[in-house]
Structure formats: structure tokens, C-alpha cells
Amino acid sequence: MAKVLMKGNEAIGEGAVRAGCRYFFGYPITPQSELPHYLAKRMPEVGGLYLQSESETAAANMVFGAAGAGARVMTSSSGPGISLMQEGISYIAGAELPCVIVNMIRGGPGLGNIAPAQSDYFQAVKGGGHGDYRVICLAPASVQEIIDLMQDAFDLADKYRNPVMLLADGVLGQMMEPVELGEEKFVQPPEKPWAATGRKKGGPKRLINSLYIVPEECEQHNLKLAKKYAVISREEQRWEEYHLDDARLVIVAFGTSARVCKAVVDRARDEGMAVGLLRPITVWPYPTGVIKRIREKVDRFLVVEMNMGQMIEDVRLAVEGARPVHFYGRAGGMMPVARDIFNEVKKLYNGGAEQ
Amino acid sequence: MAKVLMKGNEAIGEGAVRAGCRYFFGYPITPQSELPHYLAKRMPEVGGLYLQSESETAAANMVFGAAGAGARVMTSSSGPGISLMQEGISYIAGAELPCVIVNMIRGGPGLGNIAPAQSDYFQAVKGGGHGDYRVICLAPASVQEIIDLMQDAFDLADKYRNPVMLLADGVLGQMMEPVELGEEKFVQPPEKPWAATGRKKGGPKRLINSLYIVPEECEQHNLKLAKKYAVISREEQRWEEYHLDDARLVIVAFGTSARVCKAVVDRARDEGMAVGLLRPITVWPYPTGVIKRIREKVDRFLVVEMNMGQMIEDVRLAVEGARPVHFYGRAGGMMPVARDIFNEVKKLYNGGAEQ
Amino acid sequence: MGKALVTFREDRCKGCKLCTAVCPKQIIKMADHINVMGFHPAVVENQDKCTGCALCALMCPDLVIEVAREEKKVG
Amino acid sequence: MGKALVTFREDRCKGCKLCTAVCPKQIIKMADHINVMGFHPAVVENQDKCTGCALCALMCPDLVIEVAREEKKVG
Amino acid sequence: MFEGILIAGFGGQGVLSTGQLLAYAGMKENKHVAWIPSYGPEMRGGTANCGVTISDRPISSPVVSEPTVLIAMNRPSLEKFEPAVVPSGLILVNSSLIHIKTKRSDVKTVYVPANDIAESLGNGKVANNIILGVLLELTGVVSTESVLEALKEVLPPKRHNLIPINQEALEKGRQLAREFKAS
Amino acid sequence: MFEGILIAGFGGQGVLSTGQLLAYAGMKENKHVAWIPSYGPEMRGGTANCGVTISDRPISSPVVSEPTVLIAMNRPSLEKFEPAVVPSGLILVNSSLIHIKTKRSDVKTVYVPANDIAESLGNGKVANNIILGVLLELTGVVSTESVLEALKEVLPPKRHNLIPINQEALEKGRQLAREFKAS
Amino acid sequence: MKKVFTRPESLKDIPFHYCPGCTHGIVHRLVAEVIDEMDMYERALGVAPVGCSVFIYNYMDFDMYQAAHGRAPAVATGIKRVLPDRLVFTYQGDGDAAAIGTGELVHAAARGEKITVIFINNAVYAMTGGQMAPTTLLGQKTTTTPAGRDAGINGMPVKVCEMLAPLDGSAYLARVSVHNPKNIVAAKKAIRKAFDIQMRGDGFTLVEVLSSCPTNWGLSPLEALKWLEQNMIPYYPLGEYKTPAEVGK
Amino acid sequence: MKKVFTRPESLKDIPFHYCPGCTHGIVHRLVAEVIDEMDMYERALGVAPVGCSVFIYNYMDFDMYQAAHGRAPAVATGIKRVLPDRLVFTYQGDGDAAAIGTGELVHAAARGEKITVIFINNAVYAMTGGQMAPTTLLGQKTTTTPAGRDAGINGMPVKVCEMLAPLDGSAYLARVSVHNPKNIVAAKKAIRKAFDIQMRGDGFTLVEVLSSCPTNWGLSPLEALKWLEQNMIPYYPLGEYKTPAEVGK
Ligand SMILES: Cc1ncc(C[n+]2csc(CCOP(=O)(O)OP(=O)(O)O)c2C)c(N)n1
Ligand SMILES: Cc1ncc(C[n+]2csc(CCOP(=O)(O)OP(=O)(O)O)c2C)c(N)n1
Ligand code: SF4
Ligand code: SF4
Ligand code: SF4
Ligand code: SF4
Ligand code: SF4
Ligand code: SF4
Ligand SMILES: [Mg+2]
Ligand SMILES: [Mg+2]
């Protein structure tokens, strides 16, 4: 099929529709507004619903209701709005409801700005809400990958009855790139016998709930969740390797900053330096396995983020002191520039300052 | 002065009043309700205000306003309510406003239960809101320490113009213990020339703000915050050491679980095992220094938490693979029992399963 | 009259007395003994006087009371 | 009449025309040239006709217009 | 010394305040003490309980999950907490309201018709102090004097008139316990 | 090959759609392309700009922070972005609206009276395609054919009647550029 | 003999956890009876709040949801939009609906969301220990208004029906009470009417039930009902505040 | 000659960032003029919203706060409780005040918080690109109602003054417009009245200003004012919805 030029935000919408999502609840916020605009038009075409909620808090809880009723459902927001959803996300995770949450990260903290950033990494992967829960986090780096990952996002959500978050930023949301949409196939979401759709007489009673007032039962529930998270951690780590095989210096970066780092790797290779890139596609579960596998074979790691240093903790947890882990970051909505990273790489490659 | 028997929640209130706090905004939630009850009575006695907000979201933003106006101000909540404050906390940190937030952690995720837990550790220390910001987190382990730390909390908040969170749980909040209140001295909060109290003609204009629409400026703001956080990390790490000197196995635990672990250490020592306890009093900044200092001298670490394993990441980040770091946790509001931990210690001490 | 039967499920009664206040015949009393939950349960003293009006049952928050009545003959 | 002066701060004008519509004397027009911001600014064509009613200034969202008037003599 | 005392009953039976009194008395004797109530919506059922720990070492967890002493003021409390008592622990049963026996054979059980005795003293409200007296006599965890001193501080002055009757109840309890020990 | 083209002007000057057209044409030629607009409340001022990257390698950042080509459709845009152009880059200035000169001496500058020429063609709206024609001629980044092909796909069928005038504008622009090269 | 009063089938046969004399139990029964009478057991979906009545999810025998504090109308919106032919109701206290959940309540009403809110006004936050609610009366003592609610600090009690009535999306708003049998019968009628209007698709429906909390009011169950009658009803007049005829007016 | 119209001192002499013909600028000026006239420059504290008018904090020359989206009334509450003798106002759009901030707005009113909300109703979320607001009119096309607002999906537009009027804590509620000089004068009077009532301590005050957004309405500035007059005013009648005489009624 022919390629079309598509905006990242619209690709999220189209990807969701193609993945069988028929319900969107959300509240406008830059830089993801084109997604609601797109779905406000697109959902009615496929018999779906675009409903603008009165707030992000309400949106998260509408998602809770719709997911409990068995629908493929999503919401979307950025920074402040995602913070407002934290209670809801904790409830969704606690009640084990599948849904997709898009977070187009912007500069923070507070009102910050709308420029591209990765400063909500901790919030997404460590859990910005209360309690021991985990959200599967996918971090695409191109418009094509957005389309592909939206299908995965809904499938993973249903498979594990868990919220899935798509982490991106204004650059990915606003940019247009050629994409291959592929056949539009009708996706029948899986059966959900647990969904509370009305109890048949004599049938099982369904309850969508996160309350376990008896601590013993709550602990059991937590253990059950932990078991599920362990399975996800084992089965669902995804990443891209770029020139890792013989790399002496490995850059670790995700999403938009990984795009820039790829150019840095190219340039370093051009100049004869054995530099590679590890691009986590899932940031939770974190691709710890691959880092453990390569850590002894390389000299050092360089983590590049559009924040003050967050994912670096996950890298350090995987490296466990075996090698130095360096950091290069830009903050507040600034994009890292390939040249600057390259200079950093050059310095480190030639045995720059130890950690 | 004579000791009095006091409830943890009431001690928080009395400690706040003695630290010069005159404004409380909050929304009821178990297990911290005795704190609002106490302050609803106590604040009017000292010319202060107890105001019940319509929600935790509103409470956090009332705190924002009152802190911006120069007041010593606090709020308090638990699990779901703290999640609802995340946007507000991010704004408070972004605008560099001093305030104290009490989090009496309960079982989660979702509605969970009201039993004691430590499962909001990540949320507190990694930042549950959006953007690169940090909250100073204090973790008392006794009612006396609550009283003492409340003074520190307000002082640290003002010193660094940063939110400070007191992390405790229902056990600490509900229990009564003897406390020495000390002299009630009138505390004059420091001058706050930055507070927006009305602009004198010809005087400087004050703006309480977290918006930096230009990425370059937002980055500068982030760098300024990062510098402040680095100072706090260097200057304000606090912890208690208990039989650390010759310890071969070091238990790391905070708050309620650290109390239990102290008994475990006693028992281990009784049985001739060189076991010690490191109790972080600040969990952000994390007392990384002491761990780095001792890590080579001990055989192994055992982290005990009332969650599925959160603080262990900070311990592992400090240990950097130098020694095995083990975990023992109870979840969902269950209290760890000294005997069980002791059994774990015994197993590990005698060279139990490597990590 | 007297063609009615009220049944109190004693172990569910919390002794709140709401039923006693509404009985037009004033035949509901609180027992001296306590039930499994530790409450003095409500009891009917004079079943015969009961009209089956069901006001007691309507008022009871804990669904302790069932009421049966002789069906009215049509015509 | 004619004892009034309207001053337009041209570089602040966004060419929205709101002032032109409310001037009772219809003396405000949009200039052909553009200002530093790239807008065709409003200008007064016939200052003499201006009554100093200040309706234009009242309407202008960008505080482009100042109005001065001869003070009324008392009595 | 170490005592973990669990006091459980209906709301209104003075369960929480009895526990506090005990903790206060322990504090007077410079012991380490901690008191903790059950909290939250379970209270809706009307039950109340608290744990009191008195020890000469710092107290780790204030939660009395394995009581050395259980004071059961009503039947549900006995049934619920009896299994948790440590072997060779002590159970004090308010036999005025509890007409069953404990099932444990590895603990010491004392049946105290606390309400009946209290009524006989002319004030049904001091049932808790009757049973507290028994506890003091059997465990010696704190002295009667400390309890009375604590009472003075806990009660507002205008209710100090209640001290004599409470004292009487404590004494009555101790006496009962002595009889029990003798028997 | 690599071109990072920044197109900047007022809203309404077709800045965003011109950029998309270019990206589309690049895609038709199987090049790697990316397009990105400025976004957000800065737009309130009425300015608009977008970056188009066309390359034979995968594109790292779509943000054109160091343009190889700047198309400045109005004066504020020229003043704002001129310093960012790479040395020996190209600046196309819409001299119909911009009456100043660039300050850079290390870049090639071409002044194109795009609006005037467009008016002379009878449609002021094609000023952007005049200047696009200049760009194509000077850089060869994509062919005129690809642009026309892209135009067919981008324009809804009922507006295909506009294709000839746009084509004319592109040709006119190329011709101008050839004259410039010759001079 | 014929049973003239017995437990509705939609209500599971287990004891309530409520305090003696708490009228939550009465309202639960009324809701279940109406669902039985409408034969909607298989199509009923209820949303539990956070509050004393959180465990309504255990008592109702059909499928249930438990929502975050105050968010039940948003959860119900999500459900109803996915399953438009179901009977969807929320059951919420005054803290839940009139404080933290104000935004969700107002906007469910504004959108004309085809759901029913059973709104239990007991003038306190009961579950958390008797704090002031938005509906606490002036002068009423609670754990956070130890000297009685003071309008100067806390403002005046919020009248929910009155506030929602001007919203065009609200179709049926009624305030009822359950302090005596006559009012209980009227309360049931209002619930039935609300459910009927919901199923007809006319818009948002809400039944505010004045309810007692003997425990936190510090009164015996009978005194509590008297207090309700004498203090709450004068400030919160009973009646229908909106009926479908008025929709869109 | 005497200056009869000039820039108020409370308004900093810098250009607004607003689109041509956007009436936000007019309302800014009115607020500043009233503060000048009341001689309250040194005691005025304003709270900026999130919305097109976020930068009001730069334009007002006195001390300002910037609040999270919708939370300005809560922020103002915090300020006013600490500094009760200051003039505290919020400036909020319809997304800010009537959607995400509903809870804070309603409860500031219910508490009788002594603040003034300047509420800019322009029937869209302007800053984020023209999405539907709660106040968007039926049939109005926005970026999220491409076929026009449909009552069946999104309900009816919210009338804020009408909704707040039943709350006993609200002291002054007025709806004004700025589409022509006469209404601008009336708008200024209403703002003055609200500020006076606030300083008198009578309770919560709000002035709703019907305002234009030419950019997102897709109209020229003059067309926009006409659209406002012809479409908004009929649905949102101008006038005073509450004055202090009615407080406590
Ligand atoms: C976000 C959040 N805040 C606070 C609470 C604590 N909380 C539980 S119930 C409740 C109020 C209950 O009052 P109401 O809604 O009136 O119900 P009632 O108990 O009176 O029936 C509160 C504040 C919570 N669970 N979640
Ligand atoms: C929590 C949160 N949600 C969403 C946004 C994005 N946002 C910024 S302004 C705005 C709406 C603005 O509309 P309105 O309040 O009507 O003001 P206007 O721009 O129309 O003047 C929104 C949704 C945000 N900044 N924060
Ligand atoms: S049915 Fe009527 S008469 Fe019979 S006991 Fe009940 S209330 Fe009394
Ligand atoms: S109303 Fe019910 S619970 Fe109350 S006393 Fe009567 S039977 Fe018992
Ligand atoms: S002051 Fe009056 S007459 Fe003069 S230009 Fe302005 S509107 Fe016209
Ligand atoms: S109203 Fe003001 S900005 Fe608009 S055209 Fe007139 S002077 Fe210019
Ligand atoms: S606390 Fe009040 S509302 Fe809750 S169950 Fe008891 S009486 Fe009912
Ligand atoms: S978008 Fe609308 S509200 Fe915002 S500045 Fe422009 S015209 Fe004004
Ligand atoms: Mg209530
Ligand atoms: Mg608006």
C-alpha cells in the first residue's frame, strides 16, 4: 500500500481506531490536541464515541467505567493532565482494567511549557499514583512506530488487564512522516467475561473494584498483581539495537532523543568510533536483560534524556556498577542537538572523566 | 518537662502549631483524620485557620496560594488524596513555594484499604507529578520524632523554598506514645520578600509562577532547581545508625518497619549475630553517602519495606552491585512481624541464597 | 383483624427501635436478652393485634421483618 | 467641536477595526501601509471632526488610542 | 518485662480509655509504652479494641498481634482474638456478657463477672476497672497507684469525684484475682 | 543529500501547506522526509513556521534548528531565523513584504518579490509557490513533477482547477532563479 | 397467607455493616425493590461511592462497580456510553457527590447523562469519622467544626437539587426523606420515577435522600430521625425540583 | 487639553499577545481601571488562569499568581485567608472555570469566599486550539465538535451565573458583555461593584463577561462581536443574577 504523510497525533488516533478502540474520553491539552480533533471526526465514522470530559480526572474515571463495561477505550493528555489522572490510574491498575493512556510529555514542572520533554519518565514507570502497581509503558520513536504500537498497546492491555501508557512528546505528536497504514482489518476485541455488563440470573456476579478492606486480602491482591508484573517483565521487554554488536560505548535513549542519538551513532561510526545505541521501546518493563547481557562487553554507557536524569536510574540498576554510566540531558522542553551529544561521545570515548 | 501521652496524628498537629504553622487546608481521609480534628480545635486557639477544602486537589492549591502569600502552611492526606495533589505539588515545586504535606500512607493501589503501608514511596521520592522536581521527604519512626521533625519540616521548606513531605502510616498516626513537648516557643517564620502580598509603589513586582513558555528559560529554571536539589542532597541527608559499626548484615528500613527491624537487630545481637540497622530519616535526599561508606565493609543488605519493593532501588543504586541486596516485604496494609524478619535474617546471615 | 403475621429475624436485629416507634398497635418491644451481635432485639408482644400494615418492615433499616397477611377476598 | 485630540500608537495597532465601527464620526480608517507587526494600522483621517467621545478608545482591545479634550468650562 | 495487652469489646464499654489509662500508668513508671486502637470502618459494627504494650525495652511495633493478655469484654471479641494469644498467656473474660468458655487449654483464663460486680458497686460503668484490677493483680504490669495517678491526669478535674468509685473497682478486681490465685 | 528547510511567515501565507507539499514531494521520490510546525500559544501573534527535512538518510530530529534553507515570508521571520542558517546556506527573502536586507555575508541570499509576481500572475495567493519554484531551481531538492504530483494528492478534487496557476507560479519561480544564477 | 413485605430479590441476603438505625439500609432496600419491580435485575449496573455505603457493591445482587471518591458520575458515564440500554445508577454520599465530586456531578447533569444519582445527604462525612460535609447545617457540631459550623469560615450548606436545577441537562431532581413510613413510600416513588425517566432517555436524574447518621450525630436512632425532621427538612425542603416537562426550559 | 482616555497605571505598558480584536484586552483594561479608581494598586492580588489569558500576570503591574488550570479560586482562597484585607481576584476562561475548575468555583461560592472571579465566557477553549467548552452553543462548530455541538452527546451549554445563584454564599453575580461601548461601560460598573462588595466582605462575587474569540470562531473581529450579540446574548441573558440584598435569602 502507498505511504501517506501523517502527523504523530493523528497516527495515534488512526492507530487506535484500527486497533478496535471505539471510545475516547479526554480533555484538551497541548501538545496532543490534534488527537482529540482527529478522533472527534473519526470516531463517529466508525460508530465510536468521542466524548470531551470536564477534566482529566473525570476522563480517567470515564475510562474506568467504559473499561469495566468491556470496551476498548483510551484517553490522552500531557503533564498536568496526566498528574490529575494519577488517582484514576491507580484505581484502574488496582481493578485490573485494560485501557490505553497517551502522554505527550511537555516541559515541567508545574505549568512549564508545551515543548517536547521526557521529564515524566519517573511518573510513568515508577507509578505517579499511590500503591504498588505498574503501567506498561511504550515509547515510540517515529510516526510509523506509533501506528504499530497502538495495536500492541490495546492488545497488551487486554492480555494483561492492565493500563498501557504511550509515552511521546510534542515533536512526535506534531511531526509528519510517511507511514504505511496497512490493511484496515476489523479487530474483534477479546471476550471479557469479567466485564460488568449486567448479571444474568444464575450467572456470576461481576464486580469492578479495587477495595480490599481486609489487609490479608489486600496483600493477596498485591501478590497477584506482582506475579502478573513479573510475567510482563519477563515476556514483554522490547528494544531496538543499533550497532550494538561491537560497541565500546553504548548510548541508551528512548523516543525523540533516541532519534537524535541514532544520527550521533552514524556520525561516530563515520569517524571510526565503535558506538552503538540501545533504544528501549518498553520503558516499563525496562529492557534490563539486554543491558545485563552486554554490560561486561562494553566500556561505558551514556544515557541521553530530555530531562535532568531519570531513566538513568533504570540503566544503573541494570548495570549494577559494572561499568560507568554517564548522562547527557536537556531540560525544560529543549531538544538535544546531535552535535553536542557527539562531542560528549567523543570526549567519553577517548577515556573522558570517569563517573 | 513532663512527658505526655500523645497520638501520632495529634503530634503532627501540635508539632506544626509549635513550628509556627497557622494555616491548614485539607480534606478528610483515614488514617489521618485525628490530625484535622485536632487542628480544627487547635488552630483557632492560636489565631490560625483550619479550613476544610472541597477536595485534595483544592487543598493543594489553597496551600499554593497561602504559601505564595508568605504563610507557614500545611496539608495532609493519604494514598488517593495524595495522588489527587500531584498536579498541585508539581506546581508548588515549580513555583518554589515552601509548605508541608503529610502523607499517612495506606494500602493500595486504588481504594485499597486504610491499614499501614509504605507503598507510596516511589510517588513521594521519585515525583508522582510531572516534570523534574523533588520533594524533601521525612520519615519519622516514633511520635517523639514526629514532633521534632515537624519543626524541621517547616524550616527546611522555608530554607529551600521547597515542599516537604512527612511520610508515615496509620500505625504512627494512631498510636500513642510518651512525648516530651519541650518549651512552646514563639516561632517567627523567616522574612519572605518574594511573597506576593501586594506590590508597593516603586517596589519590586512579585510573581508566583511555574510557567516558562520559552524552552531556554524553562531549561534555566530546571537547572536552577537541579542546583538546589544538589545542595539539599549534599547537606540534608539524615539517618539513624543502629549497631552498624561491626555489622555483617545491614537491614535498611524506614518508619514503622524500621521499628520492627530494631527489635530484630536486638534479637539477632542477643543470638550473637552482627546485624545492624540503617534507618533513613530523609528518604529524599536518600542517605546514599552512608551506604557507599559502609558497603564494602558488610556482607549483605536486607531491605525491609511495607510494600512490594520500592526503596530497595535506592539502596541498590547506592550499593552499585558491590554487595547483594535482599528484600523482605509485606504488602496491602500488612505489618511485618519481627519473628518473620528474624528468620529471614538468620537464613541470610548464614549465607543464604545469593541475590 | 389478627389475620397477619410479622416475623422478626432476630439475629439480624440491631436494636435500633425504629420499628417500635411506627407500629400503630404499639406491639413491638425490645427484648431483655441480647442476640448474637450483642443487641437487644425487637420482638412482637401480641401478634394477634398485628394488622399486617407493614409499617415496621418499611421502617426497619436491616430487613429484619417480614410481614404476611391473609389475602383480601375479592367482592 | 474640534477641541479634541485622538492619538493612535501605531506600532501597537493590530488592525482589528473595532474602533472604526464605533466612531460616531466615521473618521477612523485603516492605513494602506503595514506597521512593524505587519498589520494595517488604524488612523484618523479628519482629526478636526473628532469630538473626543473616546468610544474608539473604549473599544480598542490593545490600548492603542489616547484621547484628550478641551476641558469644559464650568457655568 | 514485656506485656502486649489487647482489650476488646463494644464501643461504650470504655475499652479505649482503659487502654490509655494503662499506658499512662506505664509511662508514670518510666516504662516504654505504646497504645494503638483499631481504626477505620470496621468500627461501624460497634466493636472497638486497642493494644497496649508496656515494656522495659523500646517498643518495636505497637500493634499487639500476639497478645500476652487478652481482655475480652464481649463475646465476638473473645471469639475473634482468642486464637492470637501467646501460649501460656492470659485471657480475662467478662463473664457477665460472655456465656461461653475459651477453647484454649494452653493459656490461663479468668472469668470475671465484671458488669455484675460493677452493678453491685452501684455503677455499671466501672466494669472495665474491675477487670483492670484483676489484670494488675495477676500480672503486676503496673501498680494501682500509678493507675490512680494516671486517672487524675486523664479525668478532667470536674470528674475527679469519680476517682473513689474507680479505685474501689480496681481494689475489688485485685481482691477477686487474689481469690482466684488462692483457689 | 540533506536539506533542512525552514519556512516562516504570517498565518494565511500558506507557510504550513507549502512545507507539507515539499515533504509530500520528497516522499514521492522515496526520500526520507519529516515536517514539523511550530505549535502552541506563540501562534497567537499570528506567526507560523514549519521545518521540512528531506534527506537520503533516516531523519534524526525533525526540528530544523540549523536550516540549510530559510524561506522568510515576512520581516519578523527573517529577523528571527536569519542567525540560525548554516554557513553557506540559502535564504530566500520575500522582498514584496520585506524591505530590509539580510545581515549575513556567509550565506547566499535571493530576494524574491513573490507577492508582486503572484499578483502579476493574477493570484496573490500563489506567492508561496513562486518562492518554492526558486527553491527547487536552486537546490534541486525535489523535482517540479513531484511537487505537482503531490499537489494533486493534497488538493481535494474540486480544487484541482488551481493546479495550472500553481504550476505557472512554480515555473515562474524557477525562471527567476535561473536568471539569478545567470547574473 | 401472602407475604406483603419481604426482602427484594435484588438485595443479597447478608447483613448490612451499617450502625444500628442507619437509614442507608432503608435506601438500599428501596433501590432494590424498584429494580425488582421494573424487572431490571439483569440490566441494572450500580456504582458504589467511597463513604459508609461503599459496600453497597456487596449488597446489591447484580453487577456493580466501585468508583473513586466523588467520581461515580464519571464512571457511570463511561458505563452508560458503552451500554446505553442498561439502567445505570450511582449511590453517593454528600461528601462524595457534593464536595470532591462536584465537577463530575455538575457535568453529568449538564451533559444530560442518562444515569440516576441516589444522593444520600446525611450532613456529615460519616465513614471518616464525622467531619463537616458541604451539607452540614449551620451551627452543627462535627469533628472538624467543634464549635459548630460557622458561615463566616465555612459558608452556607450546599443545596444540591437547587444548584442542579438551572442546568438544562437535568431531567428529574427530587429531594425526599426516609424518616418515617410515609416519606419512605414517597422516596421509593421518586426513585422509580428517576429510573423510569432515565430509561426513557430524558436526561440526568437525581434523588436526594435526607438520611440519618446516628453515630456521628451522637444521637440515638430515634432521636436522629427527629433531628432530621426538625433541622434538615426546614433547610432542605422536600419536593421535586425538576421534572421532565421542564427539561430545556 | 485634558486626557480623557489613557492607559490605566495598573496595566503595564507592554503589548498584549492576544489576537487582533480579541476582547481579553478590553477586560484587562477594565480591571486595571477599576483598581486604579479604587486606589487598590498596592493591595490588589490577581490570579491568572491557564488559558489565553495566562499572561495577564505580565500585564497587571501589581503582584500576581499563576494558578493551575481551573484552580484559581482555590489559590485565591489560600491568599485571601492569609491576607484578608487585600483585593483578590481571579481571571478565568470558561474552560478553566466552568469545566475543570467547577468544583473550586462552586465551593468558593458556597463558602462565600471574599474574592472576585472575572469569568471570560468566549464559548471555546481558545488557547488549546478552539475545542468545545461547556459554554459552547448548540450547533456551534469547534475543533472537537466538527459537526456542531450536539445536545445528545454533549448536553446543553452551562449557564454559570444561573447555577451559582442558588448558593447562599454568592453575594454578587452578573453577566455582562464587551461587544460595544455601552456594554463595556456596564461591564466596568459590574466589576467595580463586585470589587466593592468583596471589600465590604459580603461574600463571593463573579462577573461573567461574554467575550469574543475571532481566531477560533473563524470570524473577523467585527463579525465576531456581531456573532456574540446575536448568538450568545440570547442564550446567556445579560444582567445581575444576585446582589447582596439577596444574600442569605
Ligand atoms: C480521594 C479521597 N479522599 C478522601 C477519602 C476519604 N473518604 C472516604 S469516605 C469520605 C467521605 C464520606 O462521606 P459521604 O460521602 O458523605 O458518605 P457517608 O459516609 O456520609 O455515607 C472520605 C472523605 C478517599 N477515600 N478518597
Ligand atoms: C490540567 C490541565 N489540563 C489542560 C490544560 C490545557 N489547557 C490550557 S488552556 C485550556 C483551556 C482554555 O480555555 P478557557 O479556559 O476557556 O480560556 P481561553 O483560552 O478560552 O481564554 C486548556 C484545556 C492544562 N494546561 N492543564
Ligand atoms: S405490621 Fe403493622 S401492626 Fe404489625 S407489628 Fe408491624 S407495624 Fe405493628
Ligand atoms: S427496626 Fe429492625 S433493626 Fe431496628 S429494632 Fe426494629 S427490627 Fe430491629
Ligand atoms: S474620540 Fe470619538 S469621534 Fe474621536 S475618533 Fe474616537 S470615536 Fe471617533
Ligand atoms: S481597535 Fe485598536 S487595535 Fe483595533 S484597529 Fe483600532 S486602534 Fe487598531
Ligand atoms: S457512621 Fe453514620 S452513615 Fe455510617 S453506617 Fe454509621 S450511622 Fe450510617
Ligand atoms: S485565540 Fe481567541 S481568546 Fe485567544 S487570544 Fe486569540 S482571539 Fe483571543
Ligand atoms: Mg455523608
Ligand atoms: Mg474560553
Image (cartoon, coloured by chain):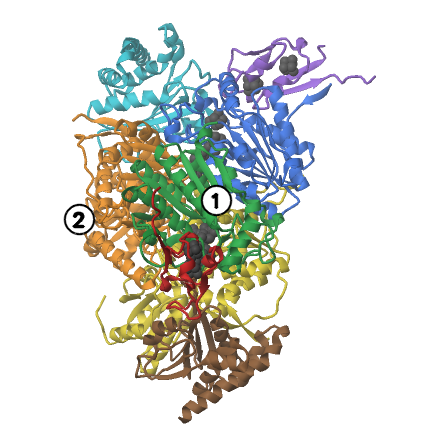
Chain colours: A yellow, B orange, C purple, D red, E cyan, F brown, G blue, H green
- The subunit carrying tag 1 is H
The CB of the residue at mark 2 lies under 8 Å from ligand 1:
no
Q: Position of residue C69 (x, y in %)?
A: 71, 17
Badge 2 is on which residue? B246
Q: Position of residue B154 (x, y in %)?
A: 24, 41
- Is circle 1 on the same chain as circle 2? no
Q: Is residue B298 visible?
A: no
| Residue G182 is at least partly visible in this image | yes
Horizontal side, residue H165 vs residue C25: left or right: left
Image mark for residue A129: none
Q: Splitting the image into 4 quarters, where does residue E6 fall?
A: top left
Q: Is residue B190 left or right of residue B41?
A: left
Chain under callout 2: B
Q: Are marks 1 and 2 in contact (CB under 8 Å)?
A: no
Identify residue for label 1.
Answer: H176
Q: Nearer the viewer, residue A77 or H152?
A: H152
Q: Amino acid at mark 1?
A: Val
Quarter holding the C terminus of chain G is top right
Q: How many marks?
A: 2
Q: Mark 2: which secondary structure?
A: loop
- The answer to which quarter of the image holds residue E61 is top left
Please identify the residue farthest to the bottom as the structure is shown: F182
Of residues A271 and B43, which is closer to you in this image?
B43
Q: State the residue lying farthest toward the right.
A: C75
What percent of the width, then of the height, locates residue A282? Answer: 44, 62
Element class at badge 1: strand
* Mark 2 neighbour class, 10 Å CA radius: few under 14, some 14 to 19, many 20 or more: few
Residues at marks 1 and 2, CA–CA distance in whole angstroms: 77 Å
Dot 1 surroundings within 10 Å: few (below 14), some, or many (20 or more)? many
In the depicted structure, whether residue E55 falls above or below residue F117: above
Q: Locate the N terminus of chain G by quadrant.
A: top right
Depth order, front residue of B353/E183 = B353
